[in-house]
């Protein structure tokens, strides 16, 4: 347990201290400069800023990233068929159907993108590193119990996050949707059964955070927003 917590803390530190600043610099270079974008002052810039400043802008970007990551998550998700007994031996389980696996992945990434994107946007605009950490953990805590919702609606029997002690069990599954809420208590273990989706989420939040901060207005103080550079024309 202590080893897992230490590894989790190391991942968090590396994400906020190394990955996020590197991505932020790369996006800043792509936009032209750290202070302004090349399209500053154009209608496109105004529309983009207005959209990202809205409640739906950062959420829409998060959903877009979720859709882009869906194939990676679906193909790497270790989903099992939970038809019958909830417990099974380590070598005595069947993979989920294609519909079950893809719907489970879609349910996890889309629910987490909508909720974490909406809640995390104002946080990352105030503090990039703390906001990114909160957004990452919120997305993970939402994805775990949300994973079986869509496949359950489609009549699929799917489970994921298989952990084995004496017997094996999918910690979140369509047999009992409340199991996902209980599995949230052990979210620190999620990289063990599902490492690729966790890494994909880290990269996604790392990309989403500087985009929301750079392309959208950030409040300089409560109730105020960053203004465009002042005009060089002398006052009349």
Image: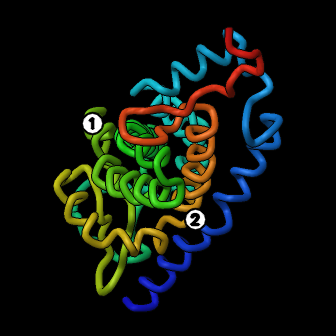
Is 190 or 19 nearer to us in this picture? 19
Residue at position x 82%, y 43% from top?
29
In the displayed structure, 92 sits above or below 44; it is below
Instruction: Please say whether residue 104 is visible from this viewpoint.
Output: no
Give x and y (percent) for residue 76.
57, 56
Please state, as top left, top right, bottom left or bottom right, where the N terminus lies in the image: bottom left
Using the image, tell me which numbered label, if any, was put on residue 16: 2
Q: Secondary structure at mark 1?
A: loop
Q: Look at discs 1 and 2 and give the one toward the viewer.
A: 2
- Judged from the image, the secondary structure of the residue bearing numbered disc 2 is helix
Report the residue at 39% width, 64% height from top: 161
| Residue depicted at 56% across the width and 73% down the height | 13
Residue 186: name its quadrant: bottom left
Bin the neighbour count of mark 1 within 10 Å (Cα to Cα): few under 14, some 14-19, many 20 and up. Answer: few
* Residue 155 figure quarter: top left
The answer to whether 103 appears left or right of 177 in the picture is: right
Q: Residue at x 55, y 79 (%)?
A: 10
Q: Is residue 3 visible?
A: yes
Local crowd at mark 2 within 10 Å, few (<14), some, or many (≥20)?
some
The picture places residue 5, in percent across and down from the top left corner, at: 42, 83
**Figure quadrant of the C terminus:** top right
Q: Is residue 86 left or right of residue 191?
A: left
Where residue 44 is drawn, which disc sits there? Answer: none
Q: Nearer the viewer, residue 166 or 42?
A: 42
Q: How is the image coloured?
A: rainbow
Q: Which residue is mark 1?
A: 155
Instruction: Give the mark count.
Output: 2
Q: In front: 75, or 20?
A: 20
């Amino acid at each position: 347990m202590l080893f897992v917590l230490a590894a989790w803390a190391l991942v968090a530190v590396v994400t906020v201290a190394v990955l996020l600043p590197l991505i932020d610099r790369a996006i800043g270079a792509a936009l032209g400069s750290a202070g302004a974008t090349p399209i500053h002052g154009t209608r496109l810039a105004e529309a983009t800023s207005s959209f990202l400043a809205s409640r739906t802008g950062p959420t829409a970007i998060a959903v877009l990233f979720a859709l882009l990551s869906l194939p990676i998550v679906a193909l790497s998700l270790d989903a099992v068929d939970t038809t019958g007994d909830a417990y099974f031996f380590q070598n005595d389980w069947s993979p989920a159907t294609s519909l079950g696996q893809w719907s489970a992945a879609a349910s996890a990434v889309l629910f987490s993108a909508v909720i974490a994107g909406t809640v995390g946007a104002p946080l990352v605009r105030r503090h990039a590193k703390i906001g990114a950490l909160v957004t990452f953990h919120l997305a993970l805590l939402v994805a775990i119990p949300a994973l079986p919702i869509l496949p359950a609606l489609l009549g699929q029997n799917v489970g994921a996050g298989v952990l084995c002690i004496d017997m094996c069990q999918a910690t979140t599954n369509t047999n009992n949707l409340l199991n996902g809420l209980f599995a949230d208590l052990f979210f620190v273990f999620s990289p063990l059964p599902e490492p690729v989706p966790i890494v994909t989420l880290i990269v996604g939040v790392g990309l989403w955070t500087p985009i929301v901060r750079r392309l959208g207005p950030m409040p300089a103080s409560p109730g105020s927003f960053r203004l465009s550079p002042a005009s060089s024309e002398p006052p009349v």
